[in-house]
Image: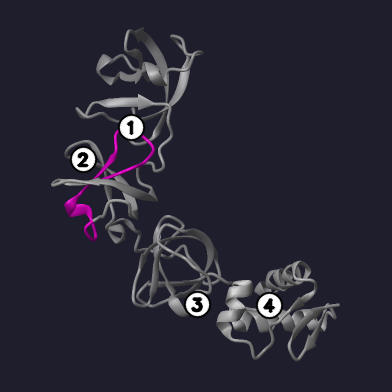
Amino acid sequence: MIEIGRINRLMALRETSVGFFLGEPDSSNPNDDVLLPNKYVPEWLANGEEIDVFIYTDSEDRPIATTLTPHIMRNEFAPLPVVSVTRIGAFLDWGLEKDLFVPHREQSRPMVVGQWYVVFLYLDQRTKRLVASSKISRFLDPDVSELYEGDEVDLLVYERTDLGFNVIINDRYQGLLYHNEVFRTIQPGDRMPGFIKTIRDDNRVDVRLQQEGFQHVEPNAQRILDALKTNNGFLPLTDNSDPQLIYKTLEMSKKTFKKAVGTLYRERKILLQQDGITLV
C-alpha cells in the first residue's frame, strides 16, 4: 500500500503528457496509481523502472509524488518556519511546493510569520491530509521504561519554560533540561546530544548536556588545551574568575573548568599563575 507522508519505492507504469503514473508492482487497481509530474521525472525513468518518491496530497487532496525530500516525514518531529497565517491556520515551509498546514486547533500558541516552531507531522485519518501540530506532548510516549539514568541520548529542544527547556528525547519521550545546567546558547529547534540525569517516580525525565564525573572532564581538558594553543599559551582564567567569563571563553561551567584544570595540572600540562593558566 502506498503510504502518504513517507518515501515509497514505486514502479513507473505508464508515461503521459503530464508525467509518469507510478504504482506498486503487484497492484492491479488503477486507483492506486499516483502521478509524478514531468518536472520531477528524471531522464533515466522508463516504464518498468523503480524510483523512490515522497507521497503527499495536492491542492485538491489527491495523492501526488515528488522526488524532492521534505524537511519532515510522517510521524516525525522537526523545526519549521511559518510562511503565512490565514483565518484557517498557519502554513509552514517544509521543502515542497505546497506548504504544510497547521490548523489553529493544533497550535500550542498562535503562530507568527517568520518564527520557527517544532512540529509533529501526522496523517489526519478523517480527511487523509497531512497535518502538522505544535502540541508536542500529545505525541510523546509516556512509557519511559527503555530509558536509564546515564544513557546518552539525542535531544530536540521544542519549548522554553520557567524551569528550563522541554526537550524530545530520541524523537519519542519528553524531558526537561534545567536553566541552571545550560552553559551555552540554545533555542527551540536545536538538536544536540545529552544524557539522562534522573527518571522520577512519576516517569518525568530530567536530562543534562554534560555527563557527570570524570568521564566528561577529559574532552573539556582538551578544549582548554586547544584554547591555550590558539591564545599564545595563556588564558586569563583562574578559580576566582567570574563564571560568565569562563562560559564566554570556553562555553563550560566554572565547576567543569575547575575539574578540567585540575586534570591538566596533575598531568603537568599547565602552570597555574595568579592571573591565569599557562601551557607548559
Disc 2 to disc 1: CB gap under 8 Å: no
Tell me which amino acid carries mark 3: Glu
Estimate how packed mark 4 is, as few (under 14), some (14 to 19) or many (20 or more) residues with alpha carbons within 10 Å: few
Which-is-in-front pick, marks 2 and 3?
3
Query: Which residue occupies the foreground of this view, 133 or 203?
Result: 133
Q: Secondary structure at mark 4?
A: helix
Q: Please give the range of residues in magenta.
A: 91-110
Q: Which residue is mark 1?
A: 97
Along the polypeptide, which appears first: circle 2 or circle 3? 2
Tell me which amino acid carries mark 4: Phe
Cα–Cα gap, marks 1 and 3? 41 Å
Tell me which amino acid carries mark 1: Glu
How many numbered circles does the render carry?
Answer: 4
Q: Which residue is mark 3?
A: 181
- Mark carried by residue 125: 2
Location of residue 141 with respect to 238 vertically, above or below: above
Determine whether, in the image, residue 87 is placed left or right of residue 24: left
Cα–Cα gap, marks 2 and 3? 41 Å
Which residue is depicted at the point 75% across and 71% down? 231
Cα–Cα gap, marks 4 and 3? 17 Å
Along the polypeptide, which appears first: circle 1 or circle 3? 1
Along the polypeptide, which appears first: circle 4 or circle 1? 1
The x and y percentages for residue 191 are: 48, 57
Query: Which residue occupies the foreground of this view, 21 or 232?
Result: 232
Quadrant for the N terminus in the image:
top left
Q: Is residue 106 magenta?
A: yes
- Mark carried by residue 214: 4
Q: Secondary structure at mark 1?
A: loop
